[in-house]
Image (cartoon, rainbow, N blue to C red):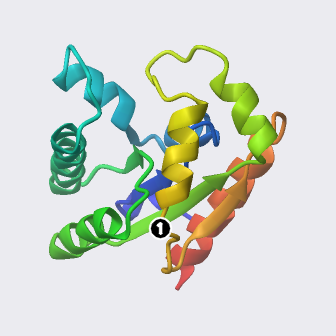
Amino acid sequence: MDQQNKQMIIVVFGLPGSGKSYFAQRLAYLLSARYENSDRIRRELFALRDYSAAEKNAVYDEILRRMLEAANRNEHIVLDATFYQEHMRERFIQSASGSGREVIFMEIVAEEDIVKSRLMKPREYSEADYAVYLRLKAIFEPFQGKHLVLESTNDNIEQMLSKAMAYIDNIHEK
């Protein structure tokens, strides 16, 4: 399957510590896609971060702006953020369809002990810790639409990427 001819918008979502950024960066590389990460964008926009609702909205507004910019340039893009609420995901779906594009969703999950271990280690851009994970887990709204769910362990990135590429190929064959 030649993915070069079909511009893709891929949203990789899930809770902090799930492995979504590790996966999304590698997927973007495989697809020669632009990669946009909510944690990096938050740091670009805010020197001091308070994780308020207004700050969250500004970050998602910027992610959406970058998605539409990529769509206008006919670039592949991989978006990496929690997208823990349905209205956030729906906004991106509506905006993409307005540009004639479909959003491919991939949810990354991991066992809680793996998440806890990951969140104890410092990460380059994310400030989320285990308390943030628990808070978001309590309010996470399951995605009801068609999407791929991938379970992240500490040694299965190649398997995850292989499943993701097969999923993308299957979508484009239809």
- Above or below residue 12? Residue 142 is below
The quadrant holding residue 48 is: top left
What amino acid type is highlighted by mark number 1? Glu
* Residue in the picture at 17% in, 25% down: 45
> Residue 25: in sight, yes or no?
no
Q: Mark 1, residues whose alpha carbon is within 10 Å: few (<14), some, or many (≥20)?
A: few
* Residue in the picture at 69% in, 49% down: 161
In the rendered image, the quadrant that contains the N terminus is bottom right
* Residue in the picture at 34% in, 72% down: 102
Residue 156 appears left or right of 101 = right
Residue 156 appears left or right of 5 = right
- Residue 112, percent across and down? 75, 44
- Residue 172, percent across and down? 51, 74
Front residue (pair 63, 30): 63
The quadrant holding residue 121 is: top right
- Residue 27, percent across and down? 56, 43
- Residue 81, percent across and down? 42, 45
Q: How many marks do you count on the picture?
A: 1
Look at mark 1 in the image and give the residue it sits on.
141
- Above or below residue 102? Residue 128 is above
- Of all residues, the one furthest to the bottom in this rendering is 174
Front residue (pair 123, 95): 123
Residue 149 appears left or right of 126 = right
- Above or below residue 113? Residue 173 is below
Q: Secondary structure at mark 1?
A: loop
> Residue 42: in sight, yes or no?
yes
